[in-house]
Amino acid sequence: METLAKKLITILNSEASNRELDSKIDSESKRIPFIHSFPKYCCEHASYLLAKIFSEHYGGDILVVKGTCCGEEHFWVEVDGSIFDITIGQFHKQPEHVMGKAIEDIPSLVAEHKIDINTAFDSWDQEHKNSWLDFIQRRLVG
């Protein structure tokens, strides 16, 4: 799982610095929201993408967790009780990312609500959500 998460980090870092809009999916230039600032301000979107990728490649009990980090709203992924957080590095004095740790090992994370990946982010732009995921999937295998 860590390898897949690191590949996603590489893709999102590339998109953050990409001025050519590789993730543009239609004539309206719809990009994955907030990815231009990865890892800052995009924990919700990055967590959704990571959780969906994990669910398609591994299965298991995969949840998106809404909570706080350092007192600020934050999202991360939990797989069978282990934490995967690819955007925690946006917070002062936090590791760049967390892969497969117990929540007790990351005292700055406070879980408030766990969301099943199949019902997560229903408020998102539904028209483009699958296109964003397809874009990431193509990059993972390319």
Image (cartoon, rainbow, N blue to C red):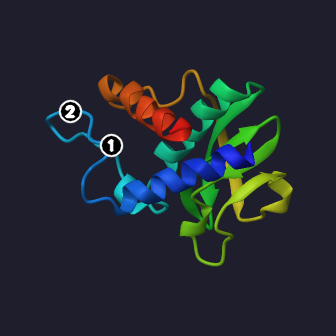
Q: Which mark is residue 26?
A: 2
Identified at 62% across, 68% down, the residue is: 70
Q: Secondary structure at mark 2?
A: loop
Is 18 or 95 nearer to us in this picture?
18
- Quadrant where the N terminus sits is top right
Q: Is residue 7 left or right of residue 124?
A: right
> Spatial distance from mark 1 to mark 2, Cα to Cα?
9 Å
Question: Residue under circle 1?
Answer: 23
Q: Secondary structure at mark 1?
A: loop
Which quarter of the figure has residue 109? bottom right
Q: Position of residue 68 (x, y in %)?
A: 61, 56
Identified at 53% across, 29% down, the residue is: 120
Amino acid at the residue labelled 2: Asp
Q: Is residue 135 left or right of residue 92?
A: left
Can residue 49 be seen by looking at this rendering? no
Amino acid at the residue labelled 1: Ser
Identified at 70% across, 48% down, the residue is: 3
Is 33 or 121 nearer to us in this picture?
33
Q: Is residue 136 left or right of residue 101?
A: left
